[in-house]
Amino acid sequence: MKMKSIHLDDLQRTEKYFFMTSTIVPRPIAVVGTLNSNGTDNLAAFSYFNAVSTEPPCIMFSVTHSRNGKKDTLVNVERNKEFVIHIAQADQHQLVNDTSESLPYGTSEREKLGLTLTPSQWIKTPRVNEFKVAFECVLENLIDVGGNTVVFGRILGAHIDESLLLQDPATGNLIPRADSHRLNPLARMDRDYGRITSDLQKPEKSY
Ligand SMILES: Cc1cc2nc3c(=O)[nH]c(=O)nc-3n(C[C@H](O)[C@H](O)[C@H](O)COP(=O)(O)O)c2cc1C
């Protein structure tokens, strides 16, 4: 193995972006739903996204500020202190890509794409029906990192297609744990989209 050492300060901004997003893979994708000030809904994808703690059950996603300032998602999260995270499936890559078209504030990407809404149970922001997993979240914390704002959210409740849930082998009852293979989540690899197709390796001991 011949290693090449790269100091990140020696890279241009886009080179840093492509170096990180081509090596820190696969990245899960959050399709974040928020409410605009005029009552319409806003949808956008974020791949700087992950779970950060179990107790409390928290996730994060990072919003890079655009040339025009804060993205609509961040403006809405700051005002409403809540949002919905949807998990997309591998075959929804085009849809996810299209949610991220930059439309004028107050215009619904979801409506333009023909997606439908259901009222949420614990927050005001509705969820999108076409995604099989949705988390209703409240804002926990915001942290600025350079020209980005990292949003930390606490999951109040979730909605999941029952066909994705595992069964208790003893009773046959559904348990709150998904079959991740059946979920077949969409992942981001560099600028492409990927699916998890390989056989999973089961370690002798799980941590
Ligand atoms: C798959 C995917 C992942 C993305 N990940 C991020 C991200 O992590 N952070 C970010 O600021 N923008 C990300 N974007 C770009 C935003 O989705 C895009 O700027 C969007 O228009 C923001 O919408 P908004 O202004 O309605 O919030 C991503 C786009 C796509 C398609």
Image (cartoon, rainbow, N blue to C red):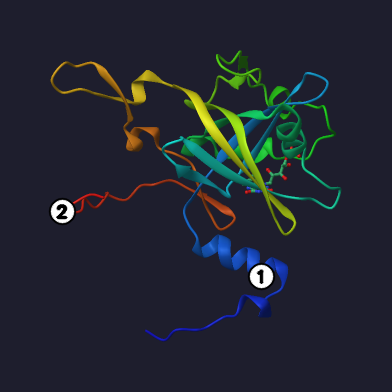
Q: Residue at x 51, y 30 (%)?
A: 155
In whole angstroms, how far apart are the C-alphas of marks 1 and 2?
39 Å
Quarter of the image where the N terminus is located: bottom left
Q: Residue at x 54, y 23 (%)?
A: 130
Q: Is mark 2 within 8 Å of ligand 1?
A: no
Secondary structure type for disc 1: helix
Q: Nearer the viewer, residue 1 or 36?
A: 36
Ligand 1 located in image quadrant: top right
Secondary structure type for disc 2: loop
Q: Amino acid at mark 1?
A: Glu
Q: Nearer the viewer, residue 197 or 134?
A: 134
Q: Residue at x 57, y 36 (%)?
A: 153
Is 1 above or below relative to 69?
below
- Residue beneath label 1, please? 15
137 horizontally vs 177: left or right: right
Q: Quadrant of residue 11?
A: bottom right
For the question of whether residue 94 can be seen, the reply is: no
- Residue beneath label 2, please? 204
For the question of whether residue 48 can be seen, the reply is: yes
